[in-house]
Image: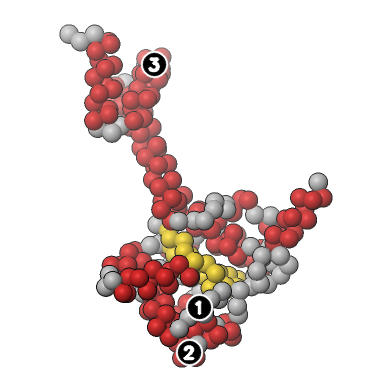
Amino acid sequence: MMTEKEINQQITILSKELRLPVLRRDYNIVSAEATKQRHSYEMFLLNLMQREYQQRLENRKKSQIRQAGFPSKLYLQDLTRSFLPLDAQEKLPLLEKLDFIESGQNIILAGNPGTGKTHIAIGLGLKACLNGYKVLFTSVHRLLTQLRESHSTRILRQMEIRFEKYDLVICDEFGYISFDKAGAELLFNHLSLRAGRKSTIVTTNLGFDRWEEIFGDPVLTAALVDRLTHKAYLVNMNGESFRLKETMEINKN
């Protein structure tokens, strides 16, 4: 018959082999609680399994946030909402419910620099990760660079398949660089893969009437605007600089 020490050693060894770190960490605590509360063996086992499951959920969320590629962790609760443009203040309570992801709708955050576009986009992306959605954050410049590299090495289709599978893609800084014809077509074709099926958030400092400056092709521009804005949430982010307001608020103290 095994001694208590031998039993504990076997539990440690087997939990490592089975990759059950929470069971290894907590089984003594749960066992003592079960004895105190006179729980059945089934309840003891259930409590251990629940702890393991909750830890795996947390680990999965952390992994999804890490893999999304956010440049920083800007949560929605960190926003001073009164500093945001009025349209953003009105629409954010609806957007943060994340129903737009389930319905495959896009969000276009358009306005002058410093008004909170990227913070809102990242905040929605982080919340989506915490709710189990698969998210990708990328700048338009980085995305186009990856597309060019994939195209040149003939692995573009693999990248397209991965891109289609994300529940939410955030394309930041739309309008900071212009494209040549080949680049514009690559970006158009790539973003069109998700149109009407999966959600994309775009942040831009240019109004739609100026997007032709980026693409250089009026027909391509009109087609992309049409696809991105169909049934989309358009958020007017023109206003005073969000960052300047925060700086002034800090300097008051």
Q: Please tell me whether mark 3 or mark 1 is closer to you in this view.
A: 1
CA–CA distance in space, label 3 to label 1: 58 Å
Mark 1: which secondary structure? helix
Residue 161 percent across, percent down from the top left: 30, 67
Q: Amino acid at mark 1?
A: Thr
Precedes in sequence: disc 1 or disc 2 = 2
Q: Residue 23, relative to residue 235: is it above or below?
A: above
Mark 1 to mark 2: distance in Å?
Answer: 18 Å
Q: Which residue is mark 2?
A: 217
Q: Amino acid at mark 2?
A: Asp
Nearer the observer, disc 1 or disc 2?
Answer: 2
Look at the numbered disc 2 and give the secondary structure of its residue.
Answer: loop
Q: Residue at x 55, y 56 (%)?
A: 123
The span from disc 2 to disc 3 (Cα, nearest Å) is: 71 Å
Q: Residue furthest right?
A: 252
Query: Residue 251 location, x and y as percent?
Result: 79, 51
- Is residue 130 visible in the rendered image? The answer is yes
Amino acid at the residue labelled 3 = Ala
Q: Earlier in the sequence, mark 2 or mark 3?
A: 3
Q: Which residue is mark 3?
A: 32
Mark 2 vs mark 3, foreground winner is 2
Residue 95 rendering spot, x and y as whole percentages: 55, 62
Q: Residues within 10 Å of mark 2 (few under 14, many from 20)?
A: some
Q: Locate residue 62: give its quadrant.
A: top left
Q: Residue at x 74, y 55 (%)?
A: 247
Q: Does residue 77 sit above or below 156 in this rendering?
A: above
212 w.r.t. 51: above or below: below
Q: Quadrant of residue 39?
A: top left
Kindly identify which residue carries mark 1.
229
Residue 96: horizontal and vertical position, in percent?
A: 55, 58
Q: Is residue 47 left or right of residue 214?
A: left
Q: Residues within 10 Å of mark 3 (few under 14, many from 20)?
A: few
